[in-house]
Image (cartoon, rainbow, N blue to C red):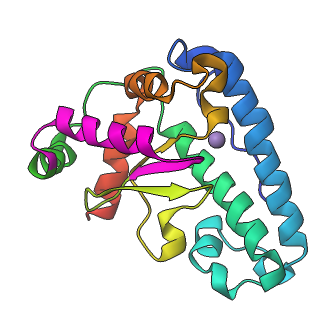
Amino acid sequence: MFSLPELSYDYGALAPAISGEIMELHHSKHHQTYVDKLNAAMEEAPELQGRAIEDILANLGSAPESVQTALRNNGGGHYNHSLFWQMMSPDGGGEPSGELAEKINERYGSFQSFVDEFTTQATGLFGSGWVWLMPNMDIITTANQDNPIMEGQPAPLLGLDVWEHAYYLDYKNVRPEYVKAWWGVVNWEFVVDRYQEVSK
Ligand code: MN3
């Protein structure tokens, strides 16, 4: 059975970029619902019991057809949000260090150009979905709760939730303001660690 991971910071700790009201709703209601529905789907597919969520999502095609959509949406929701909480920190913001910083500069020319490109994709993504920085420095988007690992790609380094539930209470329909504020809470230490893991 999957469970809701605890945050390493208080709900209000990312304010004013993201209010405590949003964080509490997003974590204790939205993410909890993904976990509950994922567990309900798992009950219908006992052969998947004990497998890691990454493994289930990377092999959706081999899951029973009757639960594939539920696993995709709710397993994806659980996996994406579990990462997302760690990709932010009250001590976040600034820029990455080391080899990741070099790779970003190599690809985008500067950190600011990378931020601009990521922001353009985040604000341009129609409907609900996510924007990701991949280990090869590509910036890609996925719809709904999809994650690149569902398409046989590696796990992303950094991701941004651009569903309205992630920002509407604070920013109403103005997604660009949410994205702009979010850069101030990005946990680059965590992202750099992920990069070092995959580039070993
Ligand atoms: Mn969300």
Pick the front one: 97 or 151: 151
In this rendering, is residue 7 above or below 67? above
Image point 50% across, 58% down: which residue?
142
x then y, percent, for residue 31:
73, 43
Question: Where 92 falls versus 138 (above or below)?
Answer: above
Quarter of the N terminus within the rendering: bottom right
How far across and how far down the image is residue 184, in percent?
A: 38, 22
Q: Is residue 128 left or right of residue 198?
A: right
**Magenta span:** 108-132
Look at the image and say whether residue 125 sits in the magenta stretch: yes
Looking at the rendering, which quadrant does residue 138 occupy?
bottom left
Query: Viewer-proximal residue, 122 or 12?
Result: 122
Question: Residue, x 52% and y 39% (percent of image)?
Answer: 86
In the depicted structure, whether residue 85 falls above or below residue 131: above
Q: Visible in this render: residue 65?
A: yes
Looking at the picture, does residue 27 appear above or below residue 62? above
Residue 93 left/right relative to 82: left
45 part of magenta stretch: no
- Which of 95 and 117 lies nearest the eye of the viewer? 117
Residue 113: x, y in percent?
A: 18, 37
Q: Residue at x 45, y 21 (%)?
A: 177
